[in-house]
Image (cartoon, rainbow, N blue to C red):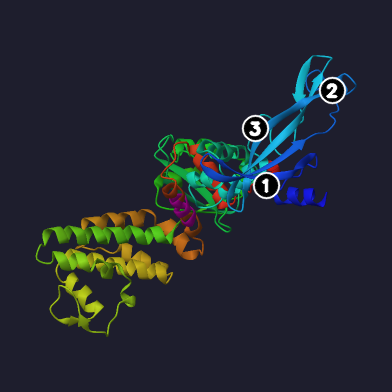
């Protein structure tokens, strides 16, 4: 009896009605692979007929066994199966037969609940679904069905929203309504609140209308990038919330404007093309981080120079590049030092030699002035949601894309830990 209990524990079987034969373990080749086969039988006295509901009596008699070949989790990294002979009964009241049922597998299914649980746990890891199928000795469609079963496990509390939230978007699947999907999370904990298929203003307004007014009034700060519809949405749906434009996106705006200025000059000045292309990173770095003292020989340059000398040499090639560079450095420094007065004086000043790209960036900074001020005065950022978006990109890359948005969403929430698969939930 102790051997039976040990075997049940090894195979993680909870049903005490499963009894193993004396020589219950065999090694067979199934589907071309070396596999372990455990043989046992299931027998107990039913309380009633499964068809007519008659209470068990002498007219319900044993009627042989029915073999069920169940897939169970691997043992010693070998594919494992449970050949379970289920006791059959015949009811003479209704002339129907039925088999004993076990809690280890759902009715009409041949994949054990413990295998499904193992698949759900593997789905929380950053591996492809094809690898999950191979690891658990099931088909890819089985993995899809199990992940899809967690769509209904997503719990939303329409009467509560956190005080600080982050808004962002990511490139969605092809079947999605919009090109981009919307993601928002708790800015303090980084926990995903929900993922919306479409990021367009109409869809988001309709979505957030489902939350109670008290929940929306509870929101104090929302961190966003410079996507204008988010600003319109927040003003309409979250009247008490401060809009914070993330500092990273502010610096990224002028960073891209300076880089476009450099590329435009590089394509025109063929004589210095290689220099502008090779040392582009030095132009985008914080000037205080450049080396001022170490002289060495650099490719494409004739003399021994420091990193600062290289930057000054490139800036002397074009007045528009030079003016845009110093505008970029001053704005970046004012944000770093949290100096609002310096920031305002820079963006309000008349700059005559800024490139067209940097002029556009300057207008955008002026337009978002109030929200950038909020960012400078706050310690909140979009860092947590950017990390989530990076995780989403990893999920898409390892799986070579997804077709269904709901399936993709369920996988994201499993990996991010918002859904915790338990054995009872399978």
How many numbered tags mark residues here?
3
Disc 2 to disc 1, C-alpha distance: 38 Å
Q: Nearer the viewer, residue 114 or 183?
A: 114
Quarter occupied by residue 44: top right
Label 3 sits on a secondary structure element that is loop
- Whether residue 161 sits left or right of residue 179 in the image: it is right
Q: Nearer the viewer, residue 272 or 105?
A: 105
Q: Nearer the viewer, residue 19 or 258?
A: 19
Q: Which residue is mark 3?
A: 109
Q: Which residue is mark 2?
A: 61
Relative to 244, does residue 322 appear above or below in the rendering?
A: below
Label 2 sits on a secondary structure element that is strand
The circle drawn on residue 316 is none
Single out the mark in the foreground, 3 or 2: 2
Extreme-right residue of the structure: 58
- Whether residue 277 sits left or right of residue 249 in the image: it is left
| Tags 2 and 1 touching, CB below 8 Å | no
Of callouts 1 and 3, the N-terminal one: 3
Single out the mark in the foreground, 2 or 1: 2
Residue drawn at (79%, 14%) of the image: 95
Q: Which residue is mark 1?
A: 422
Of callouts 2 and 1, the N-terminal one: 2
Disc 1 to disc 3, C-alpha distance: 19 Å
Magenta region: 387-394
Image spot of residue 199 (x, y percent): 45, 41
Whether residue 238 can be seen here: no
């Amino acid at each position: 009896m102790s051997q039976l209990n040990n075997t049940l524990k090894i195979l993680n079987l909870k049903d005490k009605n499963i009894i193993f034969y004396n020589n219950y373990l065999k090694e067979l080749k199934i589907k071309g692979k070396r596999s372990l086969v455990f043989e046992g039988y299931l027998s107990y006295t039913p309380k009633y007929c499964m068809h007519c509901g008659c209470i068990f009596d002498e007219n319900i008699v044993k009627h042989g066994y029915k073999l069920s070949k169940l897939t169970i989790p691997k043992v010693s990294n070998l594919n494992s199966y449970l050949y379970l002979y289920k006791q059959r009964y015949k009811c003479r009241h209704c002339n129907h037969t039925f088999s004993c049922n076990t809690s280890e597998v759902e009715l009409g299914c041949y994949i054990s609940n413990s295998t499904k649980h193992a698949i759900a746990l593997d789905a929380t890891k950053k591996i492809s679904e094809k690898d999950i199928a191979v690891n658990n000795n099931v088909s890819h469609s089985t993995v899809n069905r199990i992940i899809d079963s967690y769509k209904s496990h997503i719990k939303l509390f329409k009467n509560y929203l956190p005080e600080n939230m982050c808004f962002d978007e990511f490139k969605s699947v092809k079947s999605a309504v919009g090109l981009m999907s919307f993601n928002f999370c708790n800015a303090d904990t980084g926990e995903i609140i929900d993922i919306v298929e479409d990021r367009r203003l109409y869809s988001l307004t309709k979505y957030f209308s489902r939350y109670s007014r008290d929940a929306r009034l509870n929101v104090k700060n929302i961190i966003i990038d410079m996507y204008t519809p988010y600003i319109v949405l927040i003003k309409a749906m979250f009247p008490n919330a401060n809009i914070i434009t993330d500092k990273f996106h502010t610096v990224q705006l002028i960073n891209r404007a300076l880089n476009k200025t450099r590329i435009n000059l590089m394509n025109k000045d063929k004589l210095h093309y290689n220099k502008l292309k090779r040392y582009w990173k030095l132009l985008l770095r914080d000037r205080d981080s450049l080396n001022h003292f170490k002289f060495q020989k650099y490719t494409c340059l004739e003399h021994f120079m420091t990193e600062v000398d290289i930057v000054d040499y490139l800036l002397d090639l074009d007045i528009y590049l030079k003016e845009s560079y110093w505008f970029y450095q001053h704005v970046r420094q004012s944000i770093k030092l949290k100096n609002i007065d310096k920031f305002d004086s820079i963006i309000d000043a008349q700059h005559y030699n800024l490139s067209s790209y940097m002029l556009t960036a300057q207008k955008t900074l002026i337009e978002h002035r109030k929200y950038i001020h909020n960012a400078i005065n706050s310690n909140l950022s979009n860092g947590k949601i950017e990390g989530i978006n990076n995780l989403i990109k990893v999920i898409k890359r390892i799986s070579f894309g997804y077709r269904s948005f709901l399936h993709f969403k369920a996988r994201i929430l499993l990996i991010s830990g918002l859904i915790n698969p338990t054995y009872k939930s399978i």
